[in-house]
């Protein structure tokens, strides 16, 4: 696996695919610069070697060229984060971009305009990728958030750098973190899967059964498993067409010696509302008219014990409807348990969609070992897929 440290960038121009798809407010101010900060170590290494950086990214979902999606809006933020003045060129391919790259000196940073102003980017167009490839000596992919897409800048362009291509530090760390859970992690390995639906996580569950010793299934997903086992779940979220599948997953887990843990109690509510009346119920005995919206106190205690015994922990998906304050406590308690286990030496990876939002919202970001920067890319990795952007570098 070729990484940044395999190259000396002195007098080289690095063409870096970054993920600067950051959120902007109505005045085009960046409201969360995490993705820019995440690319900083890669950019700094190249500049310190005596090279220059040509940064390419997409921003949003423009239809053709749309000013609102211009990457020029973020160039000041890149300057602030990296601490180096940046140049900007209003196209990502063609003569203007090539001239800007030709004029780039060691220690300088050039930001190319939004890749998705050209539909060839998403189509993975070869000619477009070849044009991009003229803008650097070494191709560096540091965009985990788009590594599951076979786009021109994330995958196809790598073909034009048969020897001179590598992962940036961010992508390297993402790959290592996932491998730690799926392949090399110290045992016992625990995966916690929560969130709304079993259907969106089936492939992940089936794939991780080979890697884990314990599996906690929480959140809305849990009720399909409880009902499949004959429990009464009242009006809780359920996927009736997945009951057989739930039974099959339990069988597969038993065959693979994976211990599956489902909440034993829930905070049940009489409406899907923060102001609903609540009661603590056994998860198998939820009355009609009531729905489980969070893990109950007994479950939190049991989950704490399991987390504390684990040496490698993956967390994907909240344990309850954490967006409502009254149903966030199970997710917060789990976050606290994972933080404590991490402090005492466990490796913890949080990734995929809403769990990242929850971790940030409740301030656990610095208390876990690693928070993945890729939603879809993380989920596909956990499904066991080799992402096209990663395969293109390994090829
Ligand atoms: P996912 O995107 O599949 O990870 O699902 C995240 C969503 O699951 C969040 O918006 C949560 O509010 C929701 N969720 C978690 N637990 C429950 C539950 N018990 N009932 C309904 N929705 C839930």
Image (cartoon, rainbow, N blue to C red):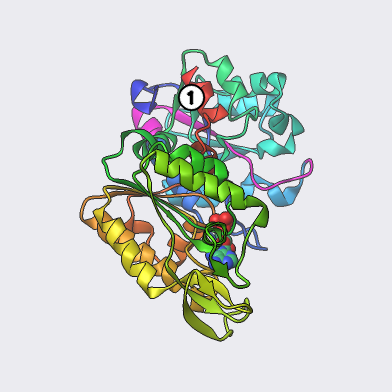
Secondary structure beneath dot 1 equals strand
The quarter in which the N terminus is drawn is: top left
Residue 300 appears in the figure? yes
Residue wearing tag 1: 13
Q: Residue furthest front?
A: 230
- Relative image position of residue 318 (x, y in whole percent): 49, 61
Residue 200 appears in the figure? no
- Relative image position of residue 159 (x, y in whole percent): 57, 16
Displayed-image quarter of ligand 1: bottom right
Please identify the quarter of the rendering in which residue 10 is found.
top left
In screen coordinates, is 351 left or right of 145? Answer: left
Q: Is residue 52 magenta?
A: yes
Residue at the image position 72 percent from the left and 52 percent from the top: 68
Camera-side residue of 102 and 57? 57
Residue bounds of the magenta highlight? 45-64
- Relative image position of residue 150 (x, y in whole percent): 63, 29
Q: Residue furthest right?
A: 64
Q: Residues within 10 Å of mark 1 (few under 14, many from 20)?
A: many
């Amino acid at each position: 696996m070729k990484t940044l440290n395999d190259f000396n960038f002195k007098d080289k121009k690095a063409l870096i695919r970054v993920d600067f798809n950051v959120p902007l407010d109505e005045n085009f101010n960046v409201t969360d610069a995490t993705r820019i900060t995440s690319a900083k170590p890669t950019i700094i290494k190249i500049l310190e070697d005596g090279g220059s950086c040509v940064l390419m990214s997409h921003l949003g979902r423009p239809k053709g060229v749309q000013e609102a999606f211009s990457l020029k809006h973020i160039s000041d933020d890149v300057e602030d984060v990296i601490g180096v003045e940046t140049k900007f060129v209003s196209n990502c391919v063609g003569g203007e971009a090539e001239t800007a790259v030709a004029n780039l000196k060691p220690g300088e940073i050039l930001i190319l305009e939004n890749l998705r102003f050209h539909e060839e980017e998403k189509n993975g167009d070869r000619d477009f990728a070849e044009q991009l490839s003229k803008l650097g000596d070494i191709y560096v992919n540091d965009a985990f958030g788009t590594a599951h897409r076979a786009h021109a800048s994330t995958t196809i362009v790598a073909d034009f750098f048969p020897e001179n291509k590598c992962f940036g530090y961010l992508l390297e760390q993402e790959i290592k973190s996932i491998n730690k859970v799926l392949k090399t992690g110290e045992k016992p390995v625990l995966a916690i899967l929560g969130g709304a639906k079993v259907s969106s996580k089936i492939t992940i569950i089936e794939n991780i059964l080979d890697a884990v010793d314990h599996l906690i299934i929480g959140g809305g997903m849990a009720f399909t498993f409880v009902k499949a086992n004959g429990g009464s779940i009242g009006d809780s979220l359920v996927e009736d067409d997945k009951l057989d599948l739930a039974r099959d997953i339990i069988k597969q887990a038993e065959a693979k010696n994976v211990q599956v843990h489902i909440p034993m109690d829930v905070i049940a509510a009489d409406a899907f509302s923060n102001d609903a009346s609540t009661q603590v119920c056994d998860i198998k005995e939820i009355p009609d008219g009531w729905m489980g919206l969070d893990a109950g106190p007994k479950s939190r205690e049991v989950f704490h014990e399991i987390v504390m015994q684990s040496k490698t922990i993956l967390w994907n998906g909240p344990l309850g409807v954490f967006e409502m304050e009254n149903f966030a406590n199970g997710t917060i308690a789990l976050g606290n348990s994972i933080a404590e286990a991490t402090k005492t030496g466990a490796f913890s990876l949080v990734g995929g969609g809403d769990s990242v939002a929850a971790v940030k919202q409740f301030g656990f970001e610095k208390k876990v070992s690693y928070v993945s920067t890729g939603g879809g890319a993380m989920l596909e990795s956990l499904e066991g897929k080799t992402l096209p952007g990663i395969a293109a570098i390994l090829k």
